[in-house]
Image (spheres, rainbow, N blue to C red):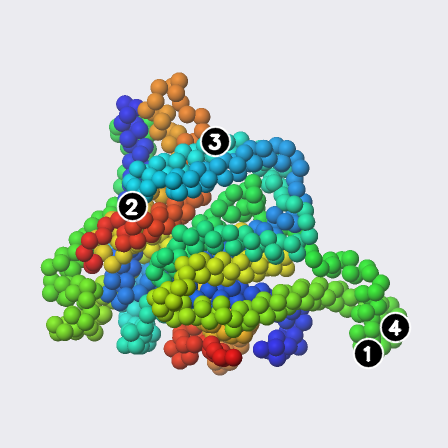
Amino acid sequence: MDLINAIILLLNYIFIPGLTYGSQLALGAIFVTLIYGILRFANFATGDMMSFGTMMTILFTWYFQSLGISLGVLPTALIALPFGIFFMILYMLTIDKFVFKYYRTQKSPPVQFAMVSIGVMFVTQAVVRIIIGPGDRRFFDGEKFIIKAREFKEMTGLNEGLALKSTQVITIFVTIVLVSLLFWFLNKTKTGKSMKAYSDNEDLALLSGIDPKKIVLVTWVIAGILATIGGALYGLDKSFKPFTYFNNMLPIFAAAIVGGIGNPFGAFLGGYVIAFSEILLTYAYKKFFMYILPESMEPEGLVQLLSTDYKFAVSFSILVIVLLYRPSGIFKGKVL
Amino acid sequence: MMVLILLVGIFQSWNIALSIFNLCLISAVMTMGANIQWGYAGLINFGIMGYTALGGLAAVIISVDPVQEAWRAGGFDILMCLWLIIVMVLVIRFILKNFEKSKLRTYSIAALIIAAIIIIRVTAEPGIEKIEAVNPATTGFLGGFGLPIIFSWIVGALFAGGLAFIVGKVALGLRADYLAIATLLISEIVIAIIKHEDWLTRGVKNVIGLKRPAPYEVDLQTTDWFINLVEKFKSSKLDLITDLSERQAALNQFVIEGSSIFVKLCYSGLFLVVVIILLILTQKALYSPWGRMMRAIRDNEEAANAMGKNVVKQHLLIFILGSAIVGIAGAMLVTQDGLFTPGSYRPMRYTFLIWVMVIVGGSGNNFGAILGGFVVWFLWIEAAPISMFLINFFTAGIPETNAIKAHLIESVPYFRFLLMGLGLLFIMRYRPKGILPEKIEIK
């Protein structure tokens, strides 16, 4: 019985939150990796672009709510998502046309691109803050829990409760669907394959008649979908605040690089690697050991490897170590 | 630029003008540090925030009086830990030097580090708890050495240089954009440590009331020579007032205003000295054989390497030098504010804004760096009034109650981001070398 309690405890506090957070990171990381692999620069505006997409989704959610449209138990934001995605893609394409295109035709070095993306970051941050303000916003509606901790306890008679939030389930479900669609697109369709070719060797791809404009367009469209959905899921699960989104850029970068930048599948797994290591290293295992060890051996302290204050620092340290020992990431192999 | 600051002095107040000027000087120092790395050597360092914070930490450690009680309570444990860390580093060095590179070596070093971290945590925990329990409302940390705060400017440089040595050793081999990300993340780690190690820095509880190199306003207001000085300066205005008590009241007002301006002027003087010294040194370095070598390495690393220049060593050197200058600026910043707030170190303000300064000013040109520091900081501060003016100008016909206008006026503070972003994008597009481009004179 104690063993089951211990397992439920880990499930509740480590596995499910890790899987949710990891999915959110993974979507962002694939976004970073696609831009890096095809447009060839590190996009420092990642976090803020995600916050732009989320903002659009929130605005439409409010609009639908004011019209009285809702999905019942599901959050209204799900209907607002396509509209958010549309405006996100529009915004990205505008920026690409006025900013990035020039440097692409000039064949500027990646560092210059990175600098330009910092300019875009500033502008996007300003736009988001001017439109929606810097405050904390919650836009979740519908049923909050699928399983409540108390109900679970009553149902099974265990000491530990297992709470399952609907946002967690939605996040994981949407991520799985989206990522499998994306991989199907990249690996099976003609456009996806030509994107791969373009990322592998630009000159050869051009020679074989691949239209670079189309590749860039498709990349931004996919990026817009990923950024909006990733951002909106994070916002639904926690809350929307422009500053947090900017900060989230760092673990997202970490996930993309740990997974091998330019490699979408690596980025996908990298998200979970980062999320789980953050949670595993900063979780206090005291209760867990109380269940599985006999009473005489109960630990005194919290049995916590690092205090939760260092949550971010964990992912960054992992990244630094990976960069030093395996700059091509854990899952290297084919690029894109 | 000076004219703009003078205009602020005339239209807003001299106090604001001087604080902008002082921060411009500090920004100029930071920009010079970043410019040395980027403009001279082409190294991209997004970790400026971390070095600034370390400089600030130096100011705290140097100037705060030691907290005797805390030292008695937990000092021994902390020293013990420090000693353990040194032993760990020495052992690792020994292993690295004396054993062949192999899987076994890597794993044993990893195991060693993990074991050491656990041991250090176990030893430190009781000490840290005791230290933080000592009068937590005002101290709760070890304090510092109680020296004049000016020394911290040098110590700040040393701290930042030390960190840069470690970072440079591990990260300089990376490609440019990886280096940018790695330095950014390392600086976040540094901030996390400063924020949460309360025994060292009081963490988010902040350290306030640091010593000053300049006199205090309150003291000045009661000093005779200062009152006489103010009287002399304002004599024309004071003479207009005939009533004696009114005259005294006006004088008091002037003295209070004058004292804060005087203190700010003291800081300006000190900062100006630093900027001038750094400018002379960096100019000399730029046109020395060493500067030529750095440019050669920047422009063609392989050729420079083939000519027998040690690229790795020079990169490390310039990384340390630039970071040390940023460290000085960090200590100067805390000195001027008189308080250390680890929570205020954010990458937006301390890394990306500085980079905007470098790019806008002109990389590779020291005068450009200083100009960039001035222009960008000025705009950063004055963006809100400027955009307020513009909004009012363009929406003059719309009534005050209009929702969009009210919303715009409410979000005035965020127009500075827009201004910075657009400024950076335009400079990158139409003047990629900055306002004052790098010019190489061959003497």
- Please name the residue that numbered disc 4 is placed on: B243
Spatial CA span between label 3 and label 2: 28 Å
Residue occupying image coordinates x 36% and y 27%: A289
Density class for disc 2 (Cα within 10 Å; few <14, some 14-19, many ≥20) is many
Check if mark 3 and mark 2 are on a common chain: no
Residue A185 drawn at (x, y percent): 15, 60
Circle 3 residue? B122
CA gap between label 3 and label 4 equals 72 Å
Q: CA distance from mark 1 to mark 3?
A: 69 Å
Image coords of residue B8 (percent x, y): 62, 75
**Mark 2 — on which chain does it sit?**
A
Camera-near label (1 vs 4) is: 1
The secondary element bearing badge 1 is classed as: helix
Task: Report which residue position mark 2 lands on.
Answer: A273
Closer to viewer: mark 3 or mark 2? 3
**Mark 4 residue type:** Asp
Disc 3 packing (10 Å; few <14; some 14–19; many ≥20): few
Q: Specify the label residue B236 is tagged with.
A: 1
As shown in the figure, which amino acid type bears the numbered disc 2? Val
Q: Disc 2 on helix, strand or loop?
A: helix
Q: Earlier in the sequence, mark 1 or mark 3?
A: 3
